[in-house]
Image: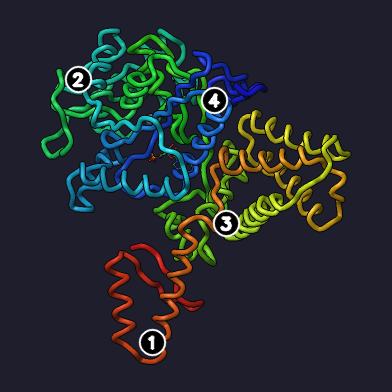
Amino acid sequence: MKSGELLMYNSLSRQKEVFKPIQEGYVGMYVCGPTVYNDVHLGNCRTFISFDIIYRYLTYLGYQVRYVRNITDVGHLLDDGEDRMSKGARLDNLEPMEVAQKYTNGFHDIMRTFNTLSPGIEPRATGHILEQIEMVTEILKNGLAYEKNGSVYFDTVKYAEKTGEYGKLSGRVIDELLSETRDNLKNQDEKNHPSDFAIWMKASDEHIMKWNSPWSVGFPGWHLECSAMSTKYLGKKFDIHGGGNDLKFPHHENEIAQNVGACNCQPANYWLHTNMLLMNGKKMSKSDGNTISPQELFTGASEHVSKGYHPMVVRFFMLQSHYRSTNDLTDEGLQAAEKGFKRIMEAFKSVHSLHSDIENIAPLDQKIDEIIQGAFDDMNDDFNTPRVLARLFELVTFINSLKEGQIKMSEVSNDALEKIKSTLYTILFEIFGLKDESETNAGPVDGLMQLVIELRQLARTNKDWPTSDKIRDSLSDLNIQIKDGKEGSSWSYK
Ligand code: AMP
Ligand code: ZN
């Protein structure tokens, strides 16, 4: 295990705490995954990239990490009460399970493009209906839920009386919750209190996804899946539970209540939450058009960006903000990230051509050690990636000064140069999960597409319509479309 204390901000205690795993050398980590009824958006990607870096860092420190990230494919209802999966099925004219598979595949593709490591276990809610039914049974047995007309509701008032804990994570108090307006559940009048929530819902005749249970043919409440699956794969008590800020309430608050209700045990020791990705200072939102898909961002086929950005530039851009701060996506910010990313990658290459003959300690060695130690201290300080990057840029300046002769090679030992090389390698590639843009596929693909676009343009200029039509049709067969704009043509996947 690497030395140094790792501090984590725990949303439950609202302070940074020294990380102490339950079992030495092992970390159990559960992260709430996507609801697979439509394409993941960049905001989702920010959260998953943040946890990828946490996963990578824990692994780097020497922990064996059991990383579980679920797939939500049932029970997550829309404001009007419709299941998100049924809506996806209706819109795409598919079976709900086809919808789940389609968007799970798309999610995996995007995660791979961002060089995000796969979790060790990726359980689906629909694959764990029995476990969820068992959990409802336990909660009922413990007197913290009640059945009405085939649906089962968690009794938040009884739970609050018994534990005094409801609202602890989100900072809401039970009186506030009781007076809150109606939530998105149908059958509101069946509940004893407005803050109670369904853990099993009786399905209407037209509802597509439903299962037999002791109470009715129905489906589990959304929050239940994470309680049941985290318990199954990580145990009643595990180390880290994560997700986006927007999940604190009601999802995670209710998850805690269910775990305590069923197992008499608060599930996770550390609750980690990422902050939201914004675009041009406003919440990213599909309904008011303030959104951009990962593909649009990569190809530049969007009014919000002046050109396409490589996935590694986007990943680098995300690293420039701390995971608990909001991150504002702008074209200018991406351009700056592109410059920074190139600068750091070039320095990484040029340091390999440098060599010092000094075998003993040289005047600048201590300074280099301090910068490197500082980078790991920053990472240990609640995964402060922007501060780590600032340290790496100090090394970049140093490398460039050596290269250009402003600093003499005699001022640094060969050992110190080797340390710079290995530190840059470890942090950039192993911990931050970046890849050199020139070694990734998107570079050549983009280059080839530019060539195809130019050939098509040439054919059009020569009024060679059969050739230009053939290019368009063949690209269309490959699911690629070309968009002609004022500033030239761009391409994107359909
Ligand atoms: P969902 O599929 O909506 O349940 O979201 C999957 C994950 O992405 C959850 O952890 C959300 O909190 C997170 N998330 C959703 N929107 C954003 C956003 N704009 N920025 C960062 N994370 C987000
Ligand atoms: Zn969850």
- The Cα–Cα distance between marks 4 and 3, rounded to whole angstroms, is 28 Å
Q: Amino acid at mark 1?
A: Arg
Question: Which of disc 3 and disc 4 is earlier in sequence?
Answer: 4
Local SS, label 3 = loop
Say which element carries label 1: helix
Name the residue beneath numbered marker 2. 148
| Ligand 1 within 8 Å of the CB at mark 1 | no
The crowding category of the residue bearing disc 2, from other C-alpha atoms within 10 Å (few below 14, some 14 to 19, many at least 20), is some
Q: Secondary structure at mark 2?
A: strand
The answer to whether the residues at label 4 and label 3 have Cβ atoms under 8 Å apart is no
Whole-percent x and y of residue 31? 43, 31
**Residue at figure coordinates x 37%, y 49% from the top left:** 109
Quadrant housing the C terminus: bottom left
- Give the amino acid at mark 4: Ser
Q: Colour scheme used in the picture?
A: rainbow
Mark 2 and mark 1: Cα distance apart in space = 68 Å
The residue where tag 3 is placed is 330
Spot occupied by residue 318 in the image (x, y as percentages of width and height): 56, 46
Q: In the rendered structure, which disc, 1 or 4, sits on the residue that comes first in sequence?
A: 4
For residue 438, say whether it is visible: yes
Quick one: label 3, few (<14), some, or many (20+) residues within 10 Å? some
Question: How far, Cα to Cα, is label 2 from label 3?
Answer: 50 Å
Which residue is disc 4 drawn over?
Answer: 11
Circle 4: element type: loop
